[in-house]
Image (cartoon, grey):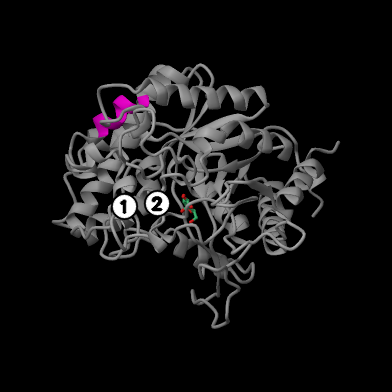
Amino acid sequence: MNTNQLPKEEFVFGVASAAFQIEGAAREDGKGESIWDVMTHEPGKTKRGNTGDITCDHYHRYREDVRLMAQLGVTGYRFSVSWSRVLPNGTGEVNRAGIDFYSNLIDELLQNGIQPYLTLYHWDLPQKLFEKGGWLNPDAPEWFYEYARLIGQRFGDRVRYFITLNEPNNVIEGMTQGGGNAPALAYTVKDRLTAIHNLLKAHGRAVQALRETVPGALIGMAPCSAVPCPIDTDLETVEQARKRYFATAPNDLLGSVTLYSDPIFLGDYPKEYYEYYRGLHPEITPEDRKLISTPVDFCYQNIYVGFPLDRDGKVPDIALPENMLSWPIWPEALYWGPKFLYERYQKPIIITENGLPNADNLCKDAKAHDPERIDFVRRYTQQLFLARAEGVDIRGYFYWSILDNLEWELGFGPRFGLIHVDFHTLKRTPKDSYYDYQKLIQEYRKP
Ligand code: BGC
């Protein structure tokens, strides 16, 4: 479809990143350690022993990076604050240099016409808090409240958009046997359910802290989901996909949409939660439910993966197109995902992450040619615009990521960036997809 037909108001094209993956300066200027700083230094925990010590060195090069974003034409930049950079112990003493860094970054963005979308927690729990039990500690929601208040007080004069937690599902993944995310330790189901509940309460406390400190704040949480897409538009097939998307399956603490989003938008965990985890889940009081469902403004969602589903609720036995991490590529995910979410939760949607990993290299002509990524972004956004044209209230799309960066425990191999980073020289080279995304944004803006 012709994207020029879309209503123009209030749609943000952005790019996203996370502190640990791009900043580097891991032990500079008074920053405290996070669980990722510690884990990436443990032998065998990351591919090739890659760490976040330097990564893209964004901490020192943020001006250059913002300039590249401005040239790209994005109007939003989603980044995360490293909790232990501003509060080295997680609570208490504030690190002035950390505050200054984010303050300068925000100023730089605004001077370039780019709205900051600030994520409070993108997995890098301060090590000091982990040593006190981390998300299992009943005080964790209060720690998060203190941190969110600080962020609101220091940056709320310039930042309007906030994301409380990035993918709580993946925080829990770090608490499973063989889970690659930090702390990569095996916790019992009971403990994981406690951690989920504390994360959701922490989300609620952060919403309250931001409401108290930032008039007009726009807030949400950003879980991720894989979207079952009906292979035809028969009502029955669509219903199968919808059912699968919102199913609460036993022992699925990672992939579930409802487990993380129902308590926020609908005021309680799905009823299956209470059946499957009887005797295992923590006590859930009416006050907890109220806190967790403190009203938010957006349904943010990270969507990379989709897969087809037939009218019998089965994935057809075909080889699905995949990316280098074996995640199925199915652009309709950005049509059905927002549609289903909007129907169920009735909040404006922003896609806070979507992107393609590749082993992009600089070619003989010193450029990074990445036709797969151009095709990926074009086809996924086309589906998103289709849903929007049909009335789904979609307010934005953030490509993950602006720069090639540290893909967590997988190291520097999978490159998601629109901009190639040479991890030896730290030189930035916009890829072909950068120029195509620039074109896409311009096409959209044309009168
Ligand atoms: C995370 C990012 C990550 C990306 C690609 C998301 O799960 O929020 O930090 O790099 O997906 O794996």
Instruction: Tell me which residue sits at (20%, 57%) in the image.
Output: 187
Instruction: Tell me which residue sits at (66%, 57%) in the image.
Output: 380
Task: State the SS at label 2.
Answer: loop
Instruction: Tell me which residue sits at (59%, 36%) in the image.
Output: 77
Q: Is residue 89 left or right of residue 151?
A: left
The tag on residue 41 is: 1
Q: Amino acid at mark 2?
A: Thr
Q: Is residue 175 left or right of residue 157?
A: left
Q: Give the quarter of the figure containing the N terminus.
A: bottom right
Instruction: State if disc 2 and disc 1 touch (CB < 8 Å).
Output: yes
Q: In terms of sequence position, does the residue under pointer 1 or pointer 2 come before the other?
A: 1
Identify which residue, 386 or 232, lies in the foreground: 386
The tag on residue 51 is: 2
Q: Residues within 10 Å of mark 2 (few under 14, many from 20)?
A: many
Q: Is residue 395 visible?
A: no
Q: Is residue 52 left or right of residue 373?
A: left
The magenta region covers 141-148
Identify which residue, 378 or 316, lies in the foreground: 378
Quadrant of the rendered image containing residue 175: bottom left
Identify which residue, 204 or 275, lies in the foreground: 204
Q: Is residue 22 left or right of residue 85?
A: right
Query: Magenta stretch: residue 90 in it?
Result: no
Q: Residues within 10 Å of mark 1 (few under 14, many from 20)?
A: some
